Structures are given as structure tokens and as C-alpha cells.
Image (cartoon, grey):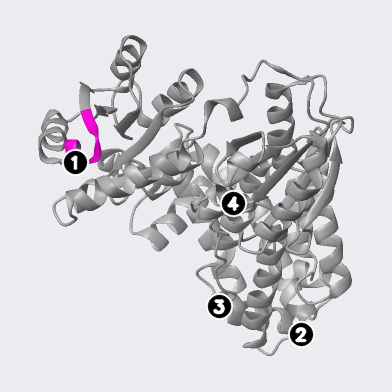
Amino acid sequence: MIKVLIVDDDKLVRKGISSAMPWKDFDMEVVGEAGNGQKALEFLQSHPVDLMLTDLAMPVMSGIELMRAAKQLYPGLHIVVLTLHQDFDYIQEALRLGAIDYIAKVQLEKEQFEHVLQRIYTRINESVQPNRLVPSLEETNVRYSTVYVLVSQDRNSEHSWVSQMNVTDYEMRWKIERNCCMWAARREQEQQLFEQLKELQLQAPQTTLFVLSDVQARTWSQIKSWIIHYTETEFFYKYTPDLRVLMLSMNDDKPFVLALQDEKLDQLKQTWFQTPWTHHELHYRELIHQFKALQLQKGQLTGLLYFIVMEWNRLFAETSLGKLTMIHSFDSWYEVETWIKQTAASIRQADKQHGYSPEIMGAVKKAVKIIQNDLTQAHTASGLSQQLNISRSYFSQCFKELMGRTFNDYTRFVRVEKAKEYLVNTNHTIAWIAEQVGYTDEKYFSRIFREMTGFLPSEYRQAGVNME
């Protein structure tokens, strides 16, 4: 009998699921309910549970926090997520943490209960492994000289290849993460295992086979941690679709995390906005080299890409230069580089519509960055055109067509927009704000601000406060 715990902060939802589902038809029994993650952990501590259905958005302890804690304390626990249809990002995180399925609450009335439980029951059976095949994490490996790991770059979808190999043919199989499994066999069976895993790769999308040596005299916890760390660091940058087999050694455990250097990040940002990398192969390769040389972790790289996209769109989204689309998700540097290449193509396509040379397009973008980066300076079309080595009249013509405003109108616009931010988000005096956006005369600043917004600065601040 599969013992079930239902966790949801809505009592009616708990009672509805508990009473409506045909649990007995699938050898299941609801043994408990909990209104939040903390109560669920207390129940798990004193009651045997095989399957936990949990909501994600709960007070005290969320479903994600509950999953992390429960998976660490009860590795054999099967988890299914209860969620609303709009919780897509949380669903992806839950699946990465090991949830075997999810149920959208809005679909419960439309979907056959039998179908839901049949799906869950099947996945539980697929994931069950004989205990003899999974040693304790703290157990030291003295038997196997090599470990084989099949890892897919697609961590979001559940693939059937994980359970396709007949595990009884080999002595050990361990699911490390979603779509990442580890096998080991006696020395006389290793070649057979290797060949079978290579055959399995033909059915497994975006997979690489690690052949990991020097694993003896290590605990299984150390081996598992090494594999997870490697896939998240070095392999993140090494992966390509053509890389099918990778020979590795646990003795190659060199530190990977590098200290971030602000000057290198700043240089990369400047290259993106000021160097015509989208039109010249040499500059493009240099940009790719700068990105990869930073060796950022995935989270840091995501933050950098978001900054670049948000900054570009802040400067150019409302102009004819176009808006950039952020990469939705990625699991390797290969995907990031593909996105950069596609982004370069979209920028080139937008630039072609104007008929200007890449040098002129780059000069206007550089001028915009100069203006935005230092609003305290009294930039003029004459001064910037001279700095950029373009005739003043031609520069003014190009600037107006690309940015949708004359140079003077644009500078006033960005100064007033920045002033709005200061007025709503700070308590600085209007005189201070005027100086920060390039106006030494507070009265002149107030007049310009009213002409463009219909409010005096003080009125705009008051209106902003009232709206909050």
C-alpha cells in the first residue's frame, strides 16, 4: 500500500483531493494532511509516507523549501506538486528538485481522476529500484574502478531513457539528478555496460557519457558531489552536441570558481554596447572570448545577460534600433553562444532597415551610452560628433532618424526621465536632483520638467507618493 500525505494551506483543497480521488484503485491510502511545509515535516518524522502531494505557495514554509528538506531527510519519498497554471517557473524548479509529476489544480475538474493517479502510479513504479543497487551515501567505494554517468542537458523534461536499461544486469545504478544517472559494474562487465550506454545515447537527447575513473576509496557522497559540481562548472562551458563521450578522473579536481573582476565585467559591457561586434567577425570572436574567459557560474551569467538585455532595452526599445529578447533558459554555454549569435543577427537585421553603415550605427549607440552614463555633463551634438569623428549635420540627421527625437529633445527626455526616478524614489531636494541631471539652475529645470510632464517637480513627487 502506497501511503499518501496531502500538503496544502487550503483545507477545502485537501479534503477535496482526499475524498475525490480513487486511491484504493491504485493501492494508495491517504494517511495524513498538513497545512504548510513545517507541519508536513513534523508528520513525516513520525509517520511512514511513500508519496507526498504538496502545494507550492504556502505560509510558514513553501513547497519548494519543503521539497529541499524532505528530499534530504527522506531520499526515497516520491513528490507530486499541486500548482496553479501560472506557476510555470516554480514547476520547473520543483521538477529539478526531483518531483515526479505535477497536477494543475485548475485541471482537476476537467481531467479524469483515474488518469491522474494512473500517471503517478506508473512513475512511482518506474522510479523504484532494488535497494541492493543503491549503496549508502557514506559508504566507501572499494569495488568499482570506474563509474559511468549519462547526463542530459535537458533537465526540464522527464525522459524514458533513464529507466530503459535493465538495472538488474548491473550491480549499481543511481539517479543523481533529473535526467542524470550513474552506473557501475564489475570489471568484466564494464565494456558491455559502456557499449550499452552508447546505444542508449541514440535515444537520449542532448546527452554526454562520462567515463569517470579514480573513484575507489571515495565515498559515494563524494563521487556524487564531484559529478554535480563538474556538470555545473567545467562541463557547462565544455558541452557541445558533438561531445558524446568524455573521459574524466576524480584526481582532476582543480578549483574552478574564479574571483569576479569588476574591470573585466565593465569591459565586456562596453564591448557589447560600443564595439561593432554584430557586424565584424573579429569583434564578435573577441566578445565571445571575453564572455567565456570570465567562467561565470550559471547564476552569475544569467544576471549579466539580464543586465545587458535590460540596459539595451532601456536605451533602445522605444526606438527603431529594436528590442532584445532575453534567453528563456539555458543549461550550457553552447546555448548562450547560440543566443548571442541569434541576437547579433537580429541587430544586423534591424540596422539594415536604415541603410546606414555599421560605423554610423555604432557611433549613434555610443553617443546614447555617453549621454546616459553622465547626465551631469552638458553634451552637445557638436561636441559628440567631433568626438566620434562625424560631421555635425550628418550626426544630427542619423541620430534623429534612429532615436526618433532630435539630439536636444533626446537629452532633455532622458534627463527628465531620470529626474522622475529621483523624485519618486528618493528624498533628495529638487535642487540636488536638478544638478544630478545636468541643470545648474533649479528654476530652469522646473520649467523644462513642467513643459515635458505637465507637472512641477514638487507636484510630480506628491502625485507619485499618493499613487503608492
In front of the other: 66 or 308 = 66
Residue, far top: 46
Lower sequence index among marks 4 and 1? 1
Q: Find out whether residue 25 is within the magenta segment.
A: yes
Quadrant the C terminus occupies: top left
Residue stretch in magenta: 24-29
Q: Which residue is mark 4?
A: 306
Label 4 to label 1: alpha-carbon separation: 49 Å
Horizontal and vertical percent position of residue 165: 59, 49
Which of the two labelled residues, at mark 1 and mark 3, occupies the earlier sequence position? 1
The spot of residue 369 in percent (x, y) is 68, 60
Residue type at mark 3? Answer: Ser
Nearer to me, 200 or 40: 200
Q: Which residue is mark 2?
A: 357
- Comes first in the chain, label 1 or label 2: 1
Task: Compare marks 2 and 4 and give the one earlier in the sequence.
Answer: 4
Image height of 101 relative to 206, above or below: above
Whether residues under marks 1 and 3 lie with C-beta atoms below 8 angstroms apart, the answer is no
**Relative to 36, does residue 359 appear above or below in the rendering?**
below
**Circle 1 sits on which residue?**
25
Cβ atoms at labels 2 and 3 below 8 Å apart: no
Circle 4: residue type: Tyr
> Alpha carbon of mark 2 to alpha carbon of mark 3: how far?
15 Å
The numbered dot on residue 320 is: 3
Mark 2–mark 4 Cα distance, whole angstroms, equals 28 Å
